[in-house]
């Protein structure tokens, strides 16, 4: 089977919830994800608590998670050690949208990678960051320099990569332009985001094929949102086009609040795992441990999201 990366995204799943999830519970949940074999976790964000109340305790969550990590057994800290396989360290992603957030993220132990949403939609960029295209590019260049100096990773998400609902110009050439610029400034991990979940499986596959050859040397992934009925088709379309990096969230909780449809959320990780297994991909997740995290996710749905449980 071929190795694939699944980036679990509790931060994206939780950020829109109005009921505050206790700090201790968040840290325990992240620990259980690590125990289950998730090596890449989009865990926290460093944004204004006035706008995203759920993320007000990101530093405290990371402090508690760091305290819990030494209790993880060696095989969960260093998968592959006994087999001679490549050891993949635990990656914790912290999202930032401005320089102040970057300062907080770099000052927080345990955050190994900084994530930044770079919108190719002018309307979405203004609504979320009140910045021009040039200002966002200057910020990304600063993120690249400072993360490199601090020995942290950087992942850039291209928001509205598969089109937008604002009647703005869009096409593969616009995505390609953004990718080539990111490559030029030496960003090495990029995720194409279907921010509002409107892409068809055909579009997902076609766009990925069209742009991937322009960015040799970049780890190019997808962060897809979807209604449940065509989620698997989108994952398989991306995989067949060559994608080996997928963002998702257990039970499909969360998604972009601008989608206007509560069924257009994150693609459920359990469905992603099933689809990738069908296609011959191996994300390295422990099924027994996965059941524990699914149980905890359903507790979050019931207590804090007031959403139906997922079997």
Image (tube, rainbow, N blue to C red):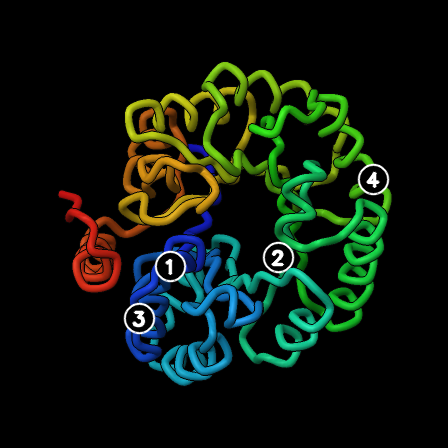
Q: Which mark is residue 115?
A: 2
Secondary structure of residue under mark 4: helix
Tell me how far mark 3 sits from mark 1, CA to CA: 8 Å
Tell me how far mark 4 sits from mark 2, CA to CA: 17 Å
Q: Nearer the viewer, mark 2 or mark 1?
A: 1
Q: Earlier in the sequence, mark 4 or mark 1?
A: 1
Q: Nearer the viewer, mark 4 or mark 3?
A: 3
Residue placed most toward the observer, 6 or 232: 232
Secondary structure of residue under mark 3: loop
Residues marked 3 and 1 touching at CB (< 8 Å): yes
Residues marked 4 and 2 touching at CB (< 8 Å): no
Q: Position of residue 224 (x, y in %)?
A: 47, 35
Tell me how far mark 2 sits from mark 1, CA to CA: 16 Å
| Residue in the picture at 72% in, 23% down | 169
Q: Which residue is mark 4?
A: 181
Tell me how far mark 4 sits from mark 3, CA to CA: 38 Å
Residues marked 2 and 3 touching at CB (< 8 Å): no
Q: Is residue 138 above or below residue 102?
A: above
| Residue in the picture at 61% in, 57% down | 115
Q: Earlier in the sequence, mark 4 or mark 3?
A: 3
Tell me how far mark 4 sits from mark 1, CA to CA: 31 Å
């Amino acid at each position: 089977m071929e190795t694939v990366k699944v980036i679990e995204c509790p931060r994206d799943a939780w950020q829109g919830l109005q009921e505050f999830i206790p700090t201790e519970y968040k840290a325990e949940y992240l620990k259980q994800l690590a125990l289950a074999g998730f090596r890449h976790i989009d865990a926290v964000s460093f944004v204004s608590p006035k706008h995203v109340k759920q993320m007000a305790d990101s530093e405290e969550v990371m402090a508690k998670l760091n305290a819990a990590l030494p209790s993880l057994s060696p095989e969960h800290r260093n998968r592959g050690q006994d087999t001679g396989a490549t050891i993949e360290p635990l990656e914790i992603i912290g999202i930032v949208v401005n320089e102040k957030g970057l300062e907080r993220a770099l000052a927080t132990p345990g955050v190994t990678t900084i994530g930044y949403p770079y919108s190719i939609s002018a309307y979405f960029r203004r609504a979320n960051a009140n910045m021009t295209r040039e200002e966002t590019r200057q910020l990304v260049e600063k993120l690249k320099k400072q993360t490199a100096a601090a020995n942290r990773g950087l992942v850039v998400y291209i928001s509205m990569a598969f089109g937008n609902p604002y009647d703005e110009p869009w096409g593969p050439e616009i995505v390609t332009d953004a990718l080539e610029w990111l490559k030029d400034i030496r960003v090495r991990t990029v995720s194409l985001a279907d921010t509002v979940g409107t892409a068809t499986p055909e579009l997902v596959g076609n766009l990925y094929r069209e742009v991937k050859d322009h960015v040799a040397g970049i780890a190019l992934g997808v962060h897809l949102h979807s209604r449940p009925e065509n989620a698997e088709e989108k994952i398989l379309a991306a995989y067949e086009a060559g994608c080996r990096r997928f963002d998702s969230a257990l039970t499909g909780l969360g998604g972009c609040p601008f989608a206007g449809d509560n069924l257009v959320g994150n693609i459920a990780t359990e469905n992603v795992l099933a689809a990738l297994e069908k296609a011959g991909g191996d994300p390295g997740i422990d099924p027994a441990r996965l059941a524990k995290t699914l149980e905890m996710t359903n507790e979050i749905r019931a207590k804090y999201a007031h959403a139906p449980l997922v079997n």
